[in-house]
Amino acid sequence: MFQRFILAVQQSSLTAEQKRQALNAVARDTTSGFLSAMRKLLMLSGAAAMIFLGLMFIKPELADKFKDLSPFAEAEEVASEATPAPDLAALMQTPSKNTSDKPNVAEDDAKMLGNQRQQQWVTNWLSKRYRVATDATNMLVSAAYLTAKEIKLDPLLILSVMAIESGLNPFAESPVGAQGLMQVMSKVHQEKFEEMGGVKAALNPVANIKVGALILKDYVSRTGSVEAGLKMYVGASAFENDSGYGSRVLTEYKRLKDVSAGKNVPTTFSAAPAPVARPAESTPAGKTDPVEAKAKTSVPKDQVAAL
């Protein structure tokens, strides 16, 4: 259409000056119209972006849905399937002493850490479930995964113990002196905190996670099973039962494993898990070897917080 207009002007009886002015006027009008249309388009795009951000603020789960529409989501899903969530039983097995059977370290680390998307799912779920700021939860989850890689323990088990013990509160402290995320008896395990700044580091989230995870791994190795290790960790090894502590931790572990696999897991249940209240007569996380305890009575059920 524009070319036909130029041809018509050139074939008209107008003078050269009049033709030039006519073409300049058309060029100005065309450019002005194009710029005006672009400004309106940008305004509409900005308004749409603001609405979109507002919707994601109100409903954070929409962000994950839009991420799934990304062409890169499929590639991440393939990577996720290639590095599945770590299996608790396999990770707790004692490694073979035969050097020819030594596993690939890089491959084991990849399985231990999963991928960034799995960690993000775990972070978002824990943040909503325990009502902790996402940034703070992200730091705790990252610390747990890095500790898991270092000591070869399932990060989801570490996070499950943190959740049940303290509700992800790094400043939690029990009446018997158990402190921090993993509710460690810092006065009993002073030597473990020495290289981290002393017992005052018990309320340092990174130090508390590392020491608590080391204690937990030691107990699992000594008892031969995760269930018995958890019973020893809560200080109920000398009693008939742990009043459901191990069951609560493993239930939370199963939920986190489902979350890390991309499953839709509710964040609210009949009641939110409360921090563990250890009975006075039981052994708090690593205080003494429960084998030496002589008490044979069971832990009173009313002294342990129910899930």
Image (tube, rainbow, N blue to C red):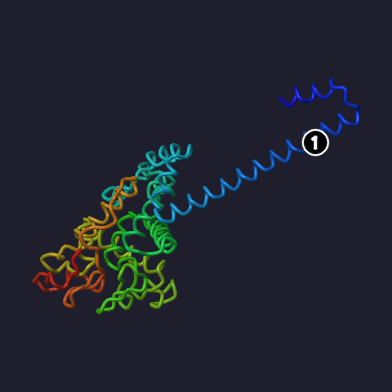
Total tally of numbered discs in the picture: 1
Q: Is residue 177 above or below residue 120?
A: below
| Percent x, y of residue 265 | 29, 50
Horizontal relation, residue 2 to residue 126: left or right: right
| Percent x, y of residue 131 | 34, 64
| Percent x, y of residue 187 | 32, 78
Instruction: Read off the residue under disc 1.
Output: 25
Question: In which quadrant is the C terminus drawn?
Answer: bottom left
Could you tell me the amino acid type at mark 1?
A: Ala
* Residue lying at the far top of the rendered structure: 11
Nearer the observer, 141 or 282 = 141
Residue shown at the point (45%, 37%) measured from the top left: 75
Residue shown at the point (24%, 67%) measured from the top left: 274
Callout 1 secondary element: helix
Residue 298: image quadrant is: bottom left
Q: Is residue 29 above or below residue 232?
A: above
| Percent x, y of residue 127 | 36, 60
Horizontal relation, residue 56 to residue 89: left or right: right
Residue shown at the point (41%, 64%) measured from the top left: 133
Nearer the observer, 193 or 164 = 164
Q: Is residue 125 above or below residue 32?
A: below
Nearer the observer, 209 or 1 = 1
Residue 137: image quadrant is: bottom left
Nearer the observer, 73 or 280 = 73
* Residue lying at the far front of the rendered structure: 13
Question: In which quadrant is the N terminus drawn?
Answer: top right
Q: Residues within 10 Å of mark 1 (few under 14, many from 20)?
A: few
